Image (spheres, rainbow, N blue to C red):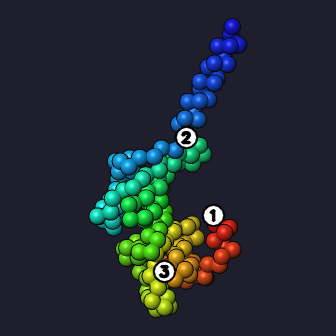
């Protein structure tokens, strides 16, 4: 009898722990950290939220994937700092792109607009409206063009 009770207790505890790490989907902006709400209000004031995925992880902190009705996708860290912004065909709001990167693309981008940006430990990766990808260091200095094989390895 003790073995059965112990087994039931173990199963219940395991299920409870597993449930704590199941992703949650919502449209309620209040599930986001304050800094994420401020970023949305500042750079996407009229955009409506289509979906928020609260992504819980066992070994790292929760992060948030937000999709807006206009198709824009934004990833936020646990603290609410944006990690990536993908505006599809629309231009990423100017204030989200470091000035040095904007200046470089303005001079060398052949009229293409920045439609996505991702923060990395080593700097930034951007996507342009003409399909070209670029890497920049933390100071916003150009490093390289992103090739198809680099994009495949990054996912």
- In the figure, is residue 11 to the left or right of 131? right
Q: Position of residue 150 (x, y in %)?
A: 66, 73
Which residue is at the front of the view, 137 or 146? 146
Please state, as top left, top right, bottom left or bottom right, where the N terminus lies in the image: top right
Circle 2: element type: loop
Say which residue label 2 marks. Answer: 21
- Residue under the point 41% across and 74% down: 90
Say which residue label 3 marks. Answer: 129
Label 1 – label 2 distance at C-alpha: 22 Å
- Residue under the point 41% across and 46% down: 26
Q: Position of residue 50 (x, y in %)?
A: 39, 55
The answer to whether the residue labelled 2 contacts the one labelled 3, judged by CB atoms less than 8 Å apart, is no
Label 3 – label 1 distance at C-alpha: 20 Å
Say which residue label 1 marks. Answer: 155
The answer to whether the residue labelled 3 contacts the one labelled 1, judged by CB atoms less than 8 Å apart, is no
For disc 3, the neighbor class at 10 Å (few under 14, some 14 to 19, many from 20) is: some
Q: Residue 129, can we see it? A: yes
Q: Earlier in the sequence, mark 3 or mark 1?
A: 3
Please state, as top left, top right, bottom left or bottom right, where the C terminus lies in the image: bottom right
Vertical placement of residue 139 versus 63, above or below: below
Q: Nearer the viewer, mark 3 or mark 1?
A: 3
Vertical placement of residue 107 versus 65, above or below: below
């Amino acid at each position: 009898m003790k073995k059965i009770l112990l087994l039931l207790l173990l199963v219940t505890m395991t299920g409870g722990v597993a449930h704590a790490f199941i992703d949650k989907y919502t449209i309620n902006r209040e599930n986001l950290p304050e800094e994420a709400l401020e970023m949305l209000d500042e750079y996407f004031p009229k955009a409506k939220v289509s979906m928020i995925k609260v992504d819980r992880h066992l070994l790292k902190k929760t992060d948030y994937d937000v999709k807006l009705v206009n198709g824009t996708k934004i990833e936020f860290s646990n603290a609410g700092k944006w990690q990536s912004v993908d505006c599809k065909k629309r231009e990423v709001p100017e204030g989200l792109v470091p000035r040095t990167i904007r200046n470089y693309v303005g001079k060398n981008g052949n009229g293409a607009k920045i439609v996505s940006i991702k923060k990395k430990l080593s700097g930034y990766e951007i996507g342009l409206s003409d399909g070209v990808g670029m890497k920049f260091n933390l100071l916003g200095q150009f490093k390289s063009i992103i090739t198809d094989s680099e994009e495949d390895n990054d996912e």
